[in-house]
Every structure is written in structure tokens, then in C-alpha cells.
Image (cartoon, rainbow, N blue to C red):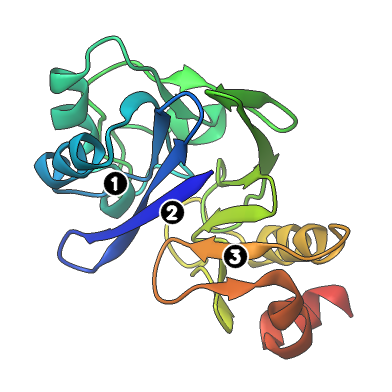
Amino acid sequence: MKIHVLQVGPIGTNCYLLEDENTHAAAVVDPGDEAGRILAQAKEDGVEIKLILLTHAHYDHTTGVAELHKALPDVPVYLHPNDAARLGTPVFPPLGMEPTLYKDGDVVRVGDIDVQVLHTPGHTPGGVCLMAGDVLFTGDTLFQGSMGRTDLPGGSYEQIMASLARLARLPGDFQVLPGHMGMSTLEAERKSNYYMQEAMG
């Protein structure tokens, strides 16, 4: 498993290329913008994009979807139904296509890699984290030393606290790959993230 990170768009959203080195299949996690760069990176890495996985449907995570879909019309775009239901409303712009829905407990495959869906609402109603091996793509649920904002439409402080508590209870340690800012580990966040500690308390 190889992961390539690209910071895309005006606010530097972390977009990830999750690549299976055995089958050369890849998934794009949160194509927030710059679809051309994402396609060029996949070509450079010698992988074929098979899935587009969205942690939530805010514009800074989805702006690149339409252009990617135009270039890759047979590649499904996955989104939780709670965010899919809000597409076309403020802060949830249309994707330009019909998403494939995934929900808590679902597993999607990227080549030989299993990616498990964890529903972690709070930043948005349909926010998810994606678990692949010892890696956790946390979108805007969990950041290094922080968490996603809850003051936008559909946000809930109580829900994000429950989601952070759920992540804290995951057994073992994970690499935390968030939607913005730097990488971390789940154990580091358990020990030093004020919001996660509040959620655990």
C-alpha cells in the first residue's frame, strides 16, 4: 500500500491517492480541486483510478469530482447518504453526477486493499472516516491537535464529540491522515488533542 498526498485548492485540502502496489489500482480520497494534477500523479505513479471516496461533501473536498468524473466516467464516487441528501444546498454543492452511497460498516476494495467506512458525523451529517490497514483517513472529523468545525449547516458539537470518542476507542494505533494540515497518529491525538480528551472524558 502506497499513499500519495497532494494539497489542492485555495485552502490546501489534503487529497490522497491510495494505491495498491500489487494490482496498481488506486482510489482518490477527497479530490478537493485540481483534477488535472490528480490524474497526472496517478499516471506518474503507474496506477489506475478505480474509486473516488469522499469523507464528506463540502466544496473544498469535492470541487475536483466533476472533472475527474468527466475523465473517468465509469469510476464510482462514494458518499454517505446523509451528505448526499444535502447536495445542492448551501455548503454542499452539486457533484455533477449521482454518487454511489456507502454507510457505516461498509467495505470497499481498492485492488487488494479493504477500506472500511466509519460514520463519524458532527462536521457534517454524513461525515465518514476511512480505515485501510493501519491508516485512518479522517477527513474533517479529526485534525492534528484539533477537530472539524461544527458551526456550518448540518454540524453538531454533540455528534462530533461522539465521533471522536469512537475513534479514540479504536484498538491499537493508526496513522491519522486528515483533510487539512499535518499528519499525526491516533495515539498522539489520544494523548494531546484537547477535543479528543474531552470526548474520551
Q: Are marks 2 and 1 in contact (CB under 8 Å)?
A: yes
Q: Position of residue 124 (x, y in %)?
A: 51, 50
Q: Nearer the viewer, residue 99 or 182?
A: 182
Q: Which residue is mark 1?
A: 90
Q: Nearer the viewer, residue 79 or 137?
A: 137
In the rendered image of this protein, does residue 130 appear above or below residue 177?
above
**Residue sitting at 72 percent across and 65 percent down?**
164
Measure how far apart labels 1 and 3 are at the Cα level: 29 Å
Q: Position of residue 171 (x, y in %)?
A: 88, 58
Quadrant holding the C terminus: bottom right
Q: Which residue is mark 2?
A: 153
Q: Position of residue 51 (x, y in %)?
A: 41, 25
Q: Which residue is mark 3?
A: 176
Mark 2: few/some/many CA within 10 Å (<14, 14-19, 20+): some
Q: Position of residue 192 (x, y in %)?
A: 71, 90
Q: Is residue 144 left or right of residue 170?
A: left
Circle 1 sits in a helix, a strand or a loop, which is it?
loop
Mark 1: few/some/many CA within 10 Å (<14, 14-19, 20+): few
Residue type at mark 1 is Pro
